Image (cartoon, helix red, strand yellow):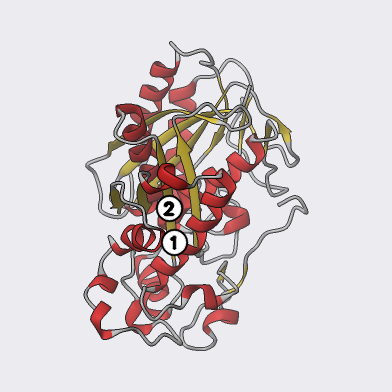
Amino acid sequence: MEAGTTGLRPLSDLLGDAINTDGLQGSWIENRQILNSRKWAPASALALYCAKQAIEDAGLSGSELKQAAVIGGSSRGNAWLHDWPGRRPFKLMAASNSMHGEIASAVSIELGITGPWQVISSGCAASLDAIGMAWMMLQSGIVRHAIVLGVELPLVEGIVRDYQDTGVLSTNGINDPYHPETSGFFPGEAGCALVLTTEDVPTAPKLTGYWCNSDADSPIGMPSDGHGLRECLSKAVHDLSDTIQPEVTAVCPHASGTLLHAMAEKQALLEALEPENEVSLHPLKPFTGHTVGASGALDTGILVHYLRSKQLPPNLKGLTSPPAPFHLPDSTTQASGTILKIAVGMGGHNSVISLTPPQ
């Protein structure tokens, strides 16, 4: 990202000639060994790999770790384990390996965590909802610490073909989510883990809110005017008006790459925010590809990395911006006020969280 280059590569480099990818690009985890485990299915192995890094980064140990919640988000879970290359699973784990819940239970079992665990599967909004559900657990006093997981491994032949048949993948190679000719997304794999806490950590960004609703409209698309997302964003803006930092200064949108979503999200942003000052947009999928259920946590992880230094991430150069007052800076900028992160799940589920930089 700092070099201003995308992580996308020709998908044929991964899948070979098993499927006609027709020049489609994607992003994937290069080291396949971290996805292979005889006991755990690939998504669970990846979740455990990421969880260990986040726990070490947060310095979580002892009784604090033991009593933490583990909340995962994934749209596919371990649904493709039967044709994962190079894996020799235990037959004893056959039933468990086909369940979404194993993603969180594997982390709980391997790390000796006895707090509550759960896996959310709201499509592309899954891991942002996982962040929101974990935050609600913290707010209600159920736990003091929560480990949030976002995991997606869609890049096997069957899954890519399903996306092609649905018509949601890019057909013209335009990696610019608000471009008037954008045609679809570039698929990606990802694993991400975050630690949330009720403790005051001066160097950490703050998670200050979570909102979600549903369009009740379509199993695949969304309303062309984005009215469900608009209502979700409007509720967020209204609730934030009574907080210490009510002004929304930046948004990390969902910006999946489909033309319908580009039009709907742009409309929702313009109508819900009605900002008096400039608002910077930070669509991150041009760098990472669309990592589906993991994208909410992945985008949040990238935001938090920059917010720790009171900065916002750069955009890929040359991206099309929605109308003023929105703009897309292509270098790091100073962070202030409130930053919103949006996720939209297939089937019409909208999620928003708010973040503020450390004071």
Q: Identify the residue under disc 2.
A: 149
- Residue situated in front as seen by the camera: 46 or 9: 46
Q: Amino acid at mark 1?
A: Ala
Q: Identify the residue under disc 1.
A: 47
Does residue 111 appear anywhere in the picture?
Answer: yes
Question: Is residue 206 found left or right of 64 in the rendered image?
Answer: right
Q: Residue at x 73, y 42 (%)?
A: 330
* Mark 1 in CB contact with mark 2 (< 8 angstroms): yes
- Residue situated in front as seen by the camera: 335 or 359: 359
Q: Residue at x 24, y 81 (%)?
A: 92
For mark 2, give the secondary structure.
strand
Q: Residue at x 37, y 44 (%)?
A: 68
Q: Quadrant of residue 216?
A: top left
The crowd level at tag 2 (other Cα within 10 Å; few <14, some 14-19, many 20+) is: many
The crowd level at tag 1 (other Cα within 10 Å; few <14, some 14-19, many 20+) is: many
Label placed on residue 267: none
- Residue situated in front as seen by the camera: 38 or 7: 38
